[in-house]
Image: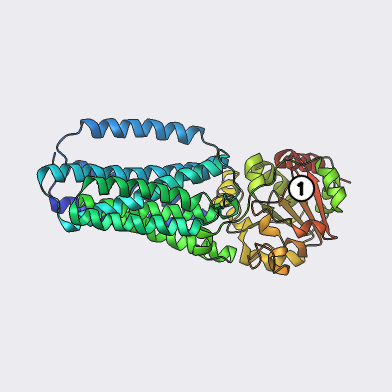
Amino acid sequence: MEISANTQALAYLAAAILFILGLKGLTHPASARRGNFFGMIGMVIAILATLLGSEVQSYGFIIAGIAAGAVIGSILAARVQMTAMPQLVAALHSFVGLAAVLVALGTYLNKSAAGLLEPVLMGELSAGIVIGAITFSGSVIAFGKLQGLISGAPMIFKGQHLLNAFIAVVTVALAVWFGMTEQLWALGAMTVLAFVLGFTLIIPIGGADMPVIISMLNSYSGWAAAATGFTLGNNLLIIVGALVGFSGAILSYIMCRAMNRSILHVVFGGFGGESEGEASAQAVAAQKGVKSASVEDAIYWMEDANKVIIVPGYGMAVAQAQHALKELMELLEERGVEVKFAIHPVAGRMPGHMNVLLAEADIPYDHVFEMDEINPEFATADVALVVGANDVTNPAAKSDPSSPIYGMPILEVGKARHVYVIKRSMRPGYSGVENLLYYQDNCSLIFGDAKEVCEGLVTALKGGGH
């Protein structure tokens, strides 16, 4: 069954509206499930409208591709842990970039053989290849850093900015030459250099900037899709690509504001990496004059508190401690303690990472507060419990002009009456900057796996504490 061009256009319009509603729903955890549903329905409509259009002549390879993708996607969805979601997102971005490159190359070969190449199409092909190649190789590097296959430390080398600028200029020059001459060697050289540029742009960036990089690569993947839409003459792909491109760019801007940094600083700078092994955590803490505490010490103050604010970080994600925190919250509330969760915009390794994990544990949305909402409440909190968060609680961002994170807005946990920080060791966070919070008189560190410590807090609370 083949549908008319008008029917296809109407279907694309409906799909575009659903995608916009989907993005709107994803702006808040409470409506995210609805947003995902709208997005899925929109994609089903888009795929069906495309398959039933006049431009599709054969379904064999298409059905095979859809079936293979469905199987792979289902397996990934079932097996990938929430802690691995940032690197999965990076991997998916790389697929979009590679798809844009392959579509552009295929279109060039087909149109060249038919003698249908013209200047506008050549420009579209060049844009799709360059943006797609940068997205692919940059996303592969981001995946490697997040997965631990590549060091999270920034790999900075002398002359990197000049090298990137040189590669970018040569790539653009080759794109122009390719558009003018249609020569295959220019296409190949441009493609290779674009892949290299994605590598050299992302490899110097440290783990501290990964939330911004993820959202920035999301934007790149959108522009790659839009360029592919122009190449294929598909209006919906252009719309969807533009939506993803702009939303990713806006999110990158929001993330940079949360870190008090510029996009250019992130892309061409980068800081931070995890330090390597240390001696016993307690021994290092004692050597540095940092107080360590036990689970019982924390429970002593928490069970009689009026207000407890919990600050989750990537350490909570790694340990999968959110379910234990849910139980701790319920036990404290049974004792009349007000419990709130404080979320920093760049906590974790992906925008919204902590919100998703807390939602996974069925922690009510009205218990979860963003940084600007919750910061005024730390001064009235009896206990602030920091679960694996580092840089986003570091007072050096406000008090030390020489610190690499100076100016970054933080969660002001140090204003609480008592602060307990759950950490595996005395290692700094991704920025590589020592956290001055740990030296405050009202702060103590509880060393151990976040899940085990949180489960210990639950057990101690059930036992009556003191």
Neighbor class of circle 1 (other Cα within 10 Å; few <14, some 14-19, many 20+) is many
Q: Give the answer, above or below, for where 211 lies relative to 61.
A: below
The residue positioned farthest toward the right in the image shown: 466
Kindly tell me whether residue 300 is visible in this rendering.
no
Q: Quadrant of residue 24?
A: bottom left
Viewer-closest of 301 and 314: 314
The location of residue 466, given as percent across then percent down, is 89, 46
Give the percent coordinates (x, y) of residue 271.
60, 56
Residue at horizontal 38 percent and vertical 42 percent from the top: 95
Residue 61: quadrant of the picture: top left
* Vertical position of residue 111 compared to residue 397: above or below: above
Residue 160, above or below 296: below
Label 1 amino acid? Met
> Which residue sits at x=63%, y=56%?
367
What colour scheme has been applied to the protein in the rendered image? rainbow
Q: Specify whether 419 is left or right of 368.
A: right
Q: Residue furthest left?
A: 115
**Foreground: 30 or 70?**
70
Report x, y in % for residue 452.
Answer: 74, 38
Q: Is residue 325 left or right of residue 348?
A: right
Depth check: give the residue in front, 9 or 102: 102
**Circle count:** 1
Looking at the rendered image, the quarter that the N terminus falls into is top left
Q: x, y (%) of residue 378? A: 73, 64
Q: Which residue is mark 1?
A: 426
Whether residue 125 is visible, yes or no, is yes
Instruction: State the residue at coordinates (45%, 55%).
Output: 163
- Relative to 2, 191 lies left or right: right
For the residue labelled by badge 1, is the local secondary structure a helix, a strand or a loop?
loop
